[in-house]
Amino acid sequence: MSDAVPTTIIIYGLALAAYALLMTALNRRVGLVLLVAVGVLEILLLVLVGIIVARLADGGRPASVPTLVGYLIAAPLVPLIAGFWGAVERSRWGPAVIAVGGLVAAILMVRFHEIWPVIHV
Amino acid sequence: MSEPMAPPEQKASPPDSTRTGPGRLLVAVYGLFALSASARASVQIATKFHHAPVAYLLSAFAAVVYIIATVTLANGSPTARRIALVSCSVEFVGVVAVGTWSIVDPATFPDATVWSGYGSGYGFVPLVLPVFGLLWLRRFRRGRPTGR
């Protein structure tokens, strides 16, 4: 069940990036749909952080705990910062910033798996 | 299901500032690399410096260059743009030099840096990023209005 979350984040992040880039191509700025979509990404990442923290609480340990903790802090900041930085831009480049956020979320799942292989993707 | 239309772009006039329009995307990507390169370099230097000192010091140098580029592009004053021009140039020379060095002499790089293999570990973004940075800065030539 919990293994489905990183996979969902990869697919969702890539889909979000594709939609956002389409909006850039169509000369749209960030609107409600993109902001809600970024909010959903934030919720998914918070669920993942919860799952990983629960594994740590159960006594599991990756090779480098500081690295994992750094990624646990950084990951939920990605949609927040991308959403804010994209929303303050009133041109087509706002959605492009959110596209980067979606791609980064997907890449982070691969990095989580490398840091701690029990996190399947 | 779609986003609102963006106001039309005024191609004739120079952009408002280095952090708006395409600059918004540049600052975002530079910020991402500033954060990830400095986090990576700090962990490497703090935990296993003697494993690959050259690689880790180059990682730290790259991190500093990314931080300077992020801050100066986000600031956008004439002085900041001049510093950004230097740091983007250093970054481009750095990624080409370190990329070549890492291929010619892989023994010096038992662990990867941001710039080894021309940034291949980061989808070659480190190679194209300074090019876009320099192209963007070219649009703010001396004598043009600087905006806000």
Image: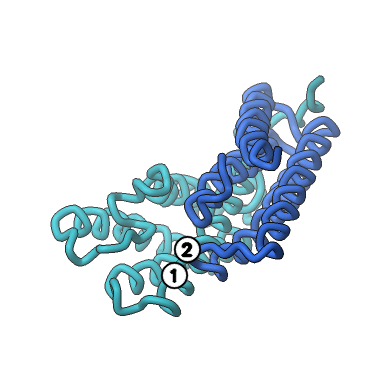
Chain colours: A blue, B cyan
Q: Position of residue A72 (x, y in %)?
A: 65, 60
Residue drawn 42% across the image and 64% down it: B87
Compared across the picture, whether A37 is left or right of A110 comes to: right
Task: Give the chain of mark 2.
Answer: B
Q: Is residue A96 visible?
A: no
Q: Position of residue B24 (x, y in %)?
A: 63, 48
Label 1, label 2: how far apart the Cα atoms are? 6 Å
Task: Give the chain of mark 1.
Answer: B
Q: Amino acid at mark 2?
A: Ala
Is B131 located above or below residue A91 in the figure? below
Compared across the picture, whether B64 is left or right of B143 comes to: left
Q: Position of residue B19 (x, y in %)?
A: 63, 53
Q: Which residue is mark 2?
A: B37
User: What kind of element bears circle 2?
Assistant: helix
Q: Is residue B17 visible?
A: yes
Compared across the picture, whether A52 is left or right of B90 comes to: right
Residue drawn 17% across the image and 63% down it: B107
CB contact under 8 Å: marks 1 and 2: yes
Q: Amino acid at mark 1?
A: Ala
Compared across the picture, whether A100 is left or right of B63 comes to: right
Residue drawn 35% across the image and 61% down it: B113
Residue B124 placement: quadrant: top left
Q: Which residue is mark 1?
A: B41
Q: What number of labels is visible?
A: 2
Residue drawn 33% across the image and 59% down it: B112
Depth order, front residue of B70/A10: A10
Is A19 located above or below residue A118 in the figure? above
User: What kind of element bears circle 1?
Assistant: helix
Circle 2 Cα neighbour tier, 10 Å, few/some/many (<14 / 14–19 / ≥20):
many
Depth order, front residue of A41/B19: A41
